[in-house]
């Protein structure tokens, strides 16, 4: 009887293992489905505000289109790296945001405020079967991170997470009345490509960590798949520049591996980090690239 119970337990564990492996395979398929060439439509509209000042001016509705190539940079069972490249015209490529997906990751850098990210370590049991999405700025510095489970139900494939982030580029150059954006991100694979839907709180966070929700907005970014040949200019650009950005990623990763809070300077020599890096030639030395990044690390 005991032998039969052990055999039954082993069979059940094997079935559960196979189910977990199949689920992980579905997750990876959904994540990598976001790669390729897309016609993107970015849509943002402020929906509500709680401003106490009657002179408050809501952000204008933003609707803009672009052609974007999502390059698969790293493809491993536990980690997928994807680089977004905007195609402004046939000759102008803009390195856009980057997203990394890590399986059952326990190390996160969570945005606090004022260009500060706090290191957080999670328990293994809290991330079982989950994927962390790590989103990076155009210069590969941290932006926001969150962990959640990919869901595959009722013919839908999606991932949902809420986390704090810095102001987006469309806001930080024109707004200074809030300093944190709490983002509810939904990544959904669709018949036309994929959707990045957002429900965002614009938060004023004081030095004691107390939050006031100034306003809310809706984001709806559609990625419509088109033939990869339309993004050839971005593919060629990446071949010429990928070695440079690999050095940048590796430098940041060594800093992240220290598992310490990170605080960055807004500028050095009156220029932000991305301006320094974008202005360097692709064949710049590892020493020179790393020195630029080091110059932006603020001492505690």
Image (cartoon, grey):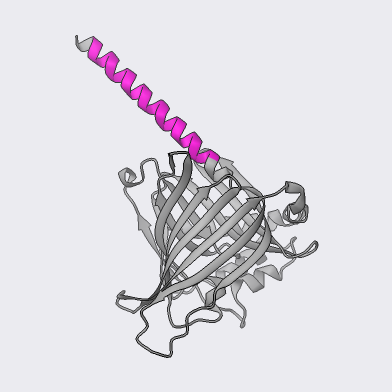
- Residue drawn at 51 percent across, 78 percent down: 59
Q: Residue furthest right?
A: 91
Place residue 2 in its image quadrant.
Answer: top left
Q: Return the x and y of residue 118 as percentages of the image width and height.
A: 39, 65
Which region shows up in magenta? Answer: 4-29
In magenta segment, residue 8: yes
Looking at this view, is 57 or 12 the one in front? Answer: 57
Q: Is residue 257 left or right of residue 37?
A: left
Looking at this view, is 128 or 270 the one in front? Answer: 128
Place residue 6 in its image quadrant.
Answer: top left
> Which quarter of the image is occupied by the C terminus?
bottom left
- Residue drawn at 44 percent across, 44 percent down: 150
Q: Return the x and y of residue 205 as percentages of the image width and height.
A: 36, 76
Q: Is residue 300 above or below residue 186?
A: below
Q: Return the x and y of residue 244 as percentages of the image width and height.
A: 68, 58
Looking at this view, is 90 or 283 the one in front? Answer: 90
Place residue 10 in its image quadrant.
Answer: top left
- Residue drawn at 53 percent across, 68 percent down: 44
Residue 13 in sight here = yes
In magenta segment, residue 22: yes
Q: Return the x and y of residue 98 as percentages of the image width and height.
A: 58, 57
> Which quarter of the image is occupied by the N terminus?
top left
């Amino acid at each position: 009887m005991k032998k039969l119970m052990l055999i039954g337990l082993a069979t059940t564990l094997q079935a559960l293992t196979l189910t977990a492996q199949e689920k992980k395979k579905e997750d990876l398929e959904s994540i990598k489905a976001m790669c390729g060439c897309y016609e993107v439509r970015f849509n943002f509209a402020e929906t509500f505000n709680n401003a106490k000042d009657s002179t408050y001016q809501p952000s204008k509705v933003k609707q803009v289109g672009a052609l974007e190539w999502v390059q698969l940079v790293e493809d491993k069972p536990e980690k997928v790296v994807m680089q977004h490249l905007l195609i402004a015209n046939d000759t102008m490529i803009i390195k856009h945001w980057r997203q990394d997906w890590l399986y059952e990751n326990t190390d996160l850098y969570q945005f606090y405020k004022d260009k500060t990210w706090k290191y957080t370590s999670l328990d293994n049991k809290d991330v079982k079967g989950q994927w962390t999405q790590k989103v990076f700025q155009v210069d590969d510095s941290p932006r926001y991170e969150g962990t959640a489970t990919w869901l595959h139900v009722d013919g839908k494939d999606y991932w949902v997470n809420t986390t704090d982030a810095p102001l987006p580029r469309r806001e930080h150059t024109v707004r200074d009345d809030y300093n944190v954006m709490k983002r509810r991100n939904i990544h959904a694979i669709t018949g036309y490509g994929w959707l990045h839907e957002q429900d965002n709180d614009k938060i004023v966070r004081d030095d004691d960590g107390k939050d006031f929700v100034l306003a809310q907005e809706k984001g709806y970014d559609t990625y419509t798949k088109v033939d990869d040949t339309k993004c050839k200019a971005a593919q060629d650009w990446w071949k010429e520049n990928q070695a440079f950005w690999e050095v940048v990623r590796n430098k940041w990763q060594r800093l992240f591996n220290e598992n310490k809070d990170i605080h960055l300077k807004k500028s050095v020599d009156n220029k932000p980090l991305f301006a320094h890096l974008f202005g360097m030639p692709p064949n710049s030395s590892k020493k020179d690239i790393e020195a630029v990044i080091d110059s932006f690390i603020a001492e505690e």
